[in-house]
Image: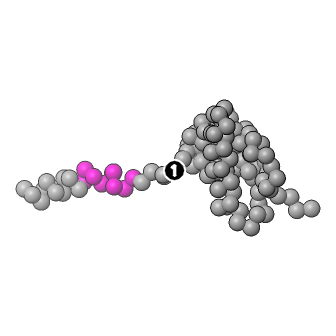
Amino acid sequence: MLKSTALAFAIFLLPVASYAPERGLSAAGLFRICGAPEPTWIGVCYGYALAVAEMFDTAGTRFCIVDVEPEKVVEAIRKTLYGQTDLHFMPAYRAIVSALDDHFPCRVD
C-alpha cells in the first residue's frame, strides 16, 4: 500500500518537477516599467538597460550608449516593444539587447 501511494504521488508530481519556467523580468514587465511616466521608473528602466548592455558588451563595441541620454535609451526600448505583443513573452534582457542592437549599434567607419 505504501509503495503504491508513493508511486502515485511521484507520478502526480512528475509534470510539475519537469517544468521549470524561465525566471526574471519579462519584456511585458519591462514595457510597463519603461512606460511609466515617473522619473524613478525611467531610472529603473535605464539602469536595467545599462546592466544588460554591460553584460552582453563587455568590450564596449556592440552598443554605443555611453553619450546617449537616459531618456533616449528608454524611448528606444518603448519603441521596440510598442505594439509587438509577440515580443512581450520573451525575457526582458533579450528585448533590451534587441532594442540596443536596432537603435544604438556601434559603427566602424
- Furthest-right residue in this view: 109
Q: Position of residue 6 (x, y in %)?
A: 16, 57
The residue located at (73%, 51%) in the rendering is: 100
Q: Check the image and tell me how it is coloured.
A: one colour
- Furthest-left residue in this view: 1
Residue position marked by numbered label 1 in the rendering:
24
Quarter occupied by residue 1: bottom left
Q: Residues within 10 Å of mark 1 (few under 14, many from 20)?
A: few
Decide whether residue 14 is among the magenta residues: yes
Pick whichever, 92 or 4, lies toward us: 92
Q: Position of residue 80 (x, y in %)?
A: 71, 41
Pick whichever, 6 or 27, lies toward us: 27
Q: Relative to 51, is 83 above or below?
A: above
The residue located at (70%, 50%) in the rendering is: 98
- Furthest-front residue in this view: 40
The magenta segment = 11-19
Q: Position of residue 30 (x, y in %)?
A: 60, 42
The kind of secondary structure element at disc 1 is loop
Query: Which quarter of the image is occupied by the C terminus?
Result: bottom right
Q: Relative to 2, is 30 above or below?
A: above
